[in-house]
Image: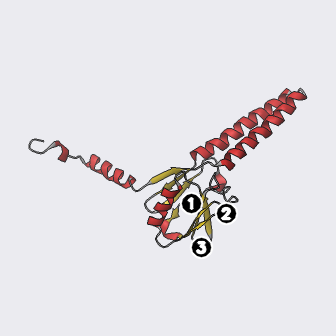
Amino acid sequence: MPGIPYSYVMTEAASEEKESLHRAEDVTVFRTKKGNIFWFGVGISILIFSLLTAIGLIFRSWTFATIFAVIGIISVSLIILAAHRTKYTFGQDELTISVPLALDVAVPPIPYSEVRKVIDSNNRRLFVYQGYSTDVIEIYYGRNEYVCISPEDKQAALDILKERCPQAAFTTERRS
């Protein structure tokens, strides 16, 4: 258009795209942190399936050995894939936890307005819920609901929760 600088010309589609990108600025995604206890579990799984495969080979049961080798490779691969693909999406109004391949632990989105308490914790018994590390964030919400997350950048996740959940009580629990 003559007389109007190019930077001022914006189509309706470009305007909508810019608006959606602006909304995306309020979304932060963290992958899960994988701590020593996760890798220990993977190592134990590999060891068990290796031993079972070796027993099959010792007794010349090729079928037995092959079955356990294949089951072991698939199992360990799925565990690592699930851990690698687990993510925590801090949206503008809610936290969404995505755990692929784990249909039994699907957690509905957690509205920030329902968060009652957040604990920065290193409780070793909690990592099995949603995190793959013992360095977790415990989130209590709704009436009696609770979830554990272990984002790679724990401090950034806590800062987002503090900003978006001003009604929540924040504490730190460290256990040795």
Instruction: Quadrant for the C terminus, please.
Output: bottom right
Give the labeled residue for mark 3: 143
* Residue 105: quarter of image: bottom right
Instruction: Answer few, some or many: residues within 10 Å of disc 2's Cα (few below 14, many 20 plus, some between 14 and 19).
Output: few
Where in the figure is residue 14, as x and y percent of width and height? 28, 46
Which residue: 48% across, 69% down? 113
Considering every residue shown, the one lying at the far front of the view is 176
Query: From what the image shows, is residue 76 above or below residue 114?
Result: above
Instruction: Give the SS element for disc 2.
Output: loop
Circle nearer the viewer, 2 or 1: 2
In 3D space, how far apart are the residues under numbered discs 2 and 1 (Cα atoms)?
A: 29 Å
- Name the disc covering residue 108, or none: 1
Instruction: Answer few, some or many: residues within 10 Å of disc 3's Cα (few below 14, many 20 plus, some between 14 and 19).
Output: few
Where in the figure is residue 54, as x and y percent of width and height? 84, 31
Give the labeled residue for mark 2: 175
Which residue: 61% across, 68% down? 145
Report the coloring of the rendering: secondary structure
Circle nearer the viewer, 2 or 3: 2
Look at label 3 and name its amino acid. Arg
**For this view, does 22 lie left or right of residue 162?**
left
In 3D space, how far apart are the residues under numbered discs 2 and 3 (Cα atoms)?
A: 26 Å
**For this view, does 4 lie left or right of residue 48?**
left
Foreground of the two, 40 or 92:
40
